[in-house]
Image: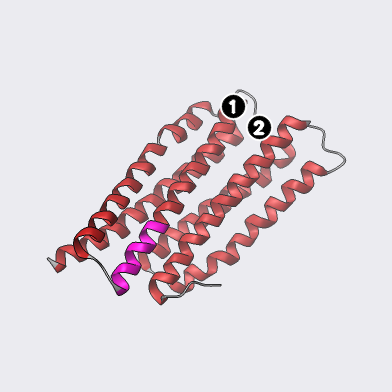
Amino acid sequence: MRDAYHEELDGLNDKLVEMTRLVRSAISRATTALLDSDLALAESVISRDDEVNATFAEVESTIFDLMARQQPVAVDLRTIITALRMGTDLERMGDLAVHVAKVARLRHPDSAIPPQLRSTILEMGQIAENLVTKAGSCVASRNVEAALELEHDDDAMDRLHRKLFRDILAKDWQYGVEPAIDITLIGRYYERYADHAVRVAQDVVYLVTGTRPG
């Protein structure tokens, strides 16, 4: 029975890694839909969020079942607590990718991104993908050193987020209020996506060491 119990714990980890794969694909496709004004791709991001939600539901179900049947303590309890936290963050990352895709859908057939900001949004999308890829690797390997690096990697996203505000508030901004609102929201979605990826990595550190980085 103990072997089966630990197989279930390992299965939780596998589901979390799968969630990182799903939300990475979601933000990648959402960024492309946004930049290319691709309605079909935007719709696919929105519809496939059900996969992320279903996987998280499996994580929750397993956790509640293990808590009821096994009454875990010590490291096992820490594993279950962090799995729930990670799953929550990853589910939210999927939602944020959907928000980006919905902006693309709303502005179709036009692009929500003015030409001068396309390179910034592209870079934010690439950083988001890189962060969740690293987070997934950390979840799979429980590599504390790699997990600690994510907070530094997130600095690049924060820098680009600030740049968007400077561009919107600049005297030569020529695109009006509606695009400014779109860009403000989009920038926030990417920034929050990155923050959640960092939190997943921080939970890896907590899982391995018993202390949260700070």
Q: Secondary structure at mark 2?
A: loop
Residue at image position (48%, 72%) is 212
Res. 114 in view:
no
Residue 9 in the figure: left or right of residue 45: left
Residue 172 falls inside the magenta stretch? no
Instruction: Say which amino acid is labelled 2.
Output: Ala
Mark 2 or 1: in front is: 1
In magenta, the rendered stretch is 74-85
Residue 110 in the figure: left or right of residue 24: right
Q: Which residue is mark 2?
A: 112
Q: How far is disc 2 from disc 1 in space, using C-alphas?
A: 8 Å
Residue 135 in the figure: left or right of residue 56: right
Residue at image position (47%, 64%) is 201
Instruction: Tell me whether the residue at label 2 lies in contact with that at label 1, contact meaning CB atoms closer than 8 angstroms.
Output: yes
Q: Which residue is mark 1?
A: 106
Residue at image position (74%, 40%) is 116
Residue 189 % position (x, y): 59, 45
The picture quadrant where one finds residue 38 is: top right
The picture quadrant where one finds residue 194 is: bottom right
- Seen as rendered, the residue at the extreme right is 171
Residue 88 % position (x, y): 42, 52
